[in-house]
Amino acid sequence: MDTLELWQYGLIALGAFLVGLGKGGLPGVGNITVVLMALALPPKASVGILLPILISADIIAVIVYRRHAEWRYIWKLAPWMLTGIVIGYFVFSRVDDAQVRFLIGLILLSMTGVHFYRKWLRRHATEIDTLPHHPVFISSTGIIGGFATMVANAAGPVAALYFIASGLPKYAYIGTSAWFFLLANLVKVPLMVDLQIIDFASIRFSASFMLYSVMGAAIAPMIVKHINQKLFEYLIWFFVIVGGIKLIIP
């Protein structure tokens, strides 16, 4: 990975920048990062390279929104998320690059479905009132999210489904998500090390792209003011779908 072609460097840098945009207030862009990384690097390696970049962005988000977290929602979801992470760990240890590429594509397309299902639920608020408190909803959301984050760093839509369905206000949602993903991503680090997906060399490689993530987080608020949020969101999900199909059908 020390000798990257220009197109590879460009995709990884763009992916890191999009991580920052996502943490800075532009929903959905992080899923494009997963696609870009998997296209620029061997799929299994891309998961390990992306993780420290995500953690750096999570730390910034926690610093900014740390006082807005609703910890009771984190504690409800955490045990199930950990279960999903452990399942993902055992699956990840038994698959090759081609299979991981397929899994990442499949997960991204599934997360897209979850995203639009979440939007449908928001239009039916009376059905949301009891949904986030149902044990089956909490456990299934946590396990699926844990598996998705371990295998593809792509649990965002699943966690968002739970936190938004719980009726969290804007800043509480951002603060709770920031803490939740920081903790979940930190838990994954020793597992990735054990799988030899992360080592000192890969961390140095990831660190060389963290500046782009910080830039994205700094620029995001200005971009939000000058774009049509709905159009932007639909474009993001369009590219996620195209990228997911590209990963499944190379």
Image: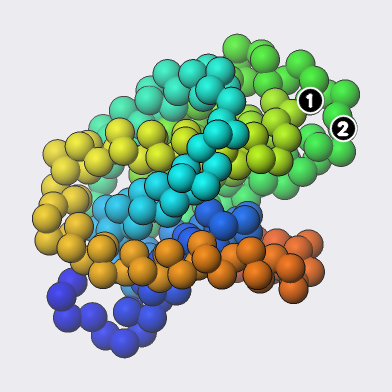
Could you tell whether 186 is left or right of 181 in the image?
Answer: left
Foreground pick, 221 / 106: 221
Residue 57 visible, this angle: yes
Residue for point 36% across, 53% down: 56
Could you tell whether 44 is left or right of 35 in the image?
Answer: left
* Residue 91 pos. (x, y %): 29, 36
Q: Amino acid at mark 2?
A: His
Identify whether 108 is placed above or below 126. below
State the mark number for residue 124.
2
Residue for point 38% across, 34% down: 183
Residue 47 visible, this angle: no
Foreground pick, 146 / 170: 170
Q: Amino acid at mark 1?
A: Ile
Q: Secondary structure at mark 1?
A: helix
Identify whether 198 is placed above or below 84. below
* Residue 74 pos. (x, y %): 51, 24
Foreground pick, 103 / 1: 1
Which residue is outermost to the bottom? 6
* Residue 167 pos. (x, y %): 74, 29
Which residue is outermost to the top? 135
Q: Quadrant of the N terminus?
A: bottom left
Q: Which residue is mark 1?
A: 128
Q: Which color scheme does this rendered protein use?
A: rainbow
